Amino acid sequence: MHFSLQPTQLACLSCIYPETEKEVSHQKHVAEALGVDLADVLQEFVSPTAALRISAKYTGLDPKALVGRAFDTLFKELCGQGALRTTEDRQVLAPFTFVSVLAGTYLAIEFVRRCSDEGRHAEFNYWRASPWHNPNLRLRQCRPRIDGCEFCSNGTLQMVNAHFWGLPAGAGTNASSPLTMLP
């Protein structure tokens, strides 16, 4: 889990969760399971054309009801129903949804803690927690930015972030241009 006040000189979400080959592999898996192309899944939402291909593979689905749905949400929903099959006609197993619920619960608790006087000066921005073990406070750490992060190294995004959070030009950012350039 990642926590930080914005803007920050520490790791942002892009630093903590950089796009990896595993992520692309998952997108390929979603495309194969739903019967669409990877290019469709990369668009994130089901188009009318993709809806027709999905409903051709899974005849019980109404293509009109699929249009505009997020591919990942549709994949997880069908997975949870046991409806998805691989090209070898093997069932695709459902992801552990309780892991997301547990992570959300931890985030909510940490949010409340950080809103209190005690939590305002948190000593960590990253915590590895397991749904199968008790919380281990020693796994909390302060993660720095990574060189070449697509967000942190983008001066324009840093300026917008500082502007959004109502901070003066360059505060908490690596931006070299003043915020006065923003409309």
Image (tube, rainbow, N blue to C red):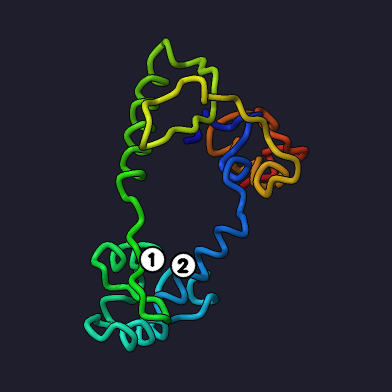
For residue 136, side relative to residue 38 (left or right): left
Q: Which mark is residue 70?
A: 1
Asked if 34 appears above or below 146 in the picture, the reply is below
Q: Where is residue 127 in the image (x, y as percent from the top left)?
A: 50, 30
Pointers 1 and 2 in contact (CB under 8 A)?
yes
- 29 lies left or right of 112: right
Point out the tag, 1 or 2, that comes first from the N-terminus: 2
Q: Tell me what residue is drawn at x 67 percent, y 38 percent.
A: 179
User: Measuring 68% from the left and 35% from the top, which residue is drawn there?
Assistant: 145
Question: In terms of image quadrants, where is residue 158?
Answer: top right
Tell me the residue at 75%/41% (across/down): 147
Instruction: Report the residue that reaches farthest toward the right.
Output: 176
Q: In this view, does 98 lie above or below 60?
A: above
Q: Which of 183 and 84 is in front in this view?
A: 84
Residue 168: image quadrant is top right
The percent position of residue 38, horizontal first and vertical second, equals 53, 75
The three-letter code of the residue at mark 1 reads Ala
Residue 39 falls in image quadrant: bottom right
Label ID, residue 44: 2
Q: Residue at x 36, y 26 (%)?
A: 134
SS label for mark 1: loop
User: Where residue 109 is drawn, which disc sits there?
Assistant: none
Dot 2, how many residues are within 10 Å of its Cα: few (below 14), some (14-19), or many (20+)?
A: some
Q: Distance between the residues labelled 1 and 2?
A: 6 Å
State the SS at label 2. Answer: loop
Nearest to the observer: residue 75 or residue 125: 75
In the image, residue 106 lies at what x, y percent?
A: 36, 31
Q: In this view, does 59 lie above or below 145?
A: below
